[in-house]
Amino acid sequence: MAADGIVLVTGGSRGIGAATATLLAQQGKRVVIIDIAPEILPGTQTMLWPDAFDVASETAVLSGIADIETVHGPITGLVNAAGVFGKMHAAERVRMDNWDREINIDLRGTFLVARSVGERMARRGHGAIVNIASVAGMTSGPIHAYTAAKAGVIQLTQTLAAEWGRAGVRVNAVSPGFTRTTALEAGIASGALDKHRLARNNAMNRLVEPIEVAHAIAWLLGATSSAVTICRSMPVLSRARRGTPMADYGKLRERR
């Protein structure tokens, strides 16, 4: 990343996005965060884009990225952290409006922002993009739209890396295991998720902390990874499995 540019973090007001934005600012980067529900990160040097930013809207993304660069300067680093984790159901109970929402935000949104920022980076001849995928995109589970979207993010990362690599733009992805975000904690508190079963699907038998994912992202954006691209999916405290038993997600079948 060029020292005079900014790092843009989507979904930067919470979860992995917030942890990453905070870490990058501590490292001296100029960080702008955007979010559908924008909130400042107290005690940090991050800059909040005040308008709600809908990554799934092509019009909003095109105009928003242009406005951000006009105000803050060129985007030399991008973290695509905006995403939603939908409800878990057996396939026959998946509502298509929920399916569309998850695909639109997690996959379409990642593509729209990456394309808008990446083509600008390519014209300037440098830049780094990190997409947030998930170990869920490499295995099975009763979160049908989410797993499909994250598998798509992994493939999209590879495609964009190949397309923009010769223009000096690196595109990589991280695939966290189950991470202790506010959304995950809410699922555990409601009884929809079982903390111990989730933890045992991570290689170190515990949940991942958002800051641990943030450090992997910061490395992929930085100069010490300058030869790394088409890292389709860097696992963070996770293990890829052929399939995740339904029981590991709680008692989905018993609740039917």
Image (cartoon, rainbow, N blue to C red):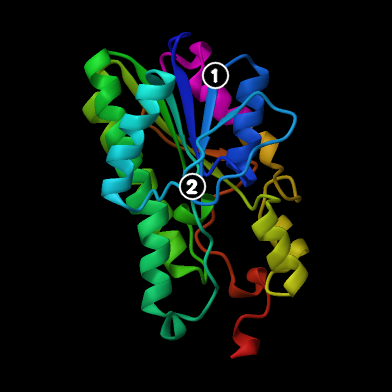
Is the residue 179 above or below the residue 253 in the image?
above
Report which quarter residue 42 is drawn in.
Answer: top right
Q: Quadrant of the C terminus?
A: bottom right
Classify mark 1: residues with Cα within 10 Å, few (<14), some (14-19) or many (20+).
many
Which residue, given by chain and number where applicable, does mark 2 sit on?
82
117 and 176: which is toward the camera: 117
Q: Is residue 200 visible?
A: no
Q: Give the residue at mark 1.
A: 30
For the N terminus, give its image quadrant: top left
Q: 206 or 218, which lies in front? A: 218
- The answer to which image quadrant residue 95 occupies is bottom left
Task: Tell me where residue 71 appears, x and y as whole percent.
Answer: 41, 23
Q: Residue at x 33, y 36 (%)?
A: 114
Q: Amino acid at mark 2?
A: Ala
Q: How many angstroms separate mark 2 from mark 1 (CA)?
A: 19 Å
Which residue is pictured at 64% across the width and 16% down the height?
27
Tags 2 and 1 in contact by the CB under 8 Å rule? no
Between discs 2 and 1, the one toward the N terminus: 1
Count of numbered circles in the view: 2
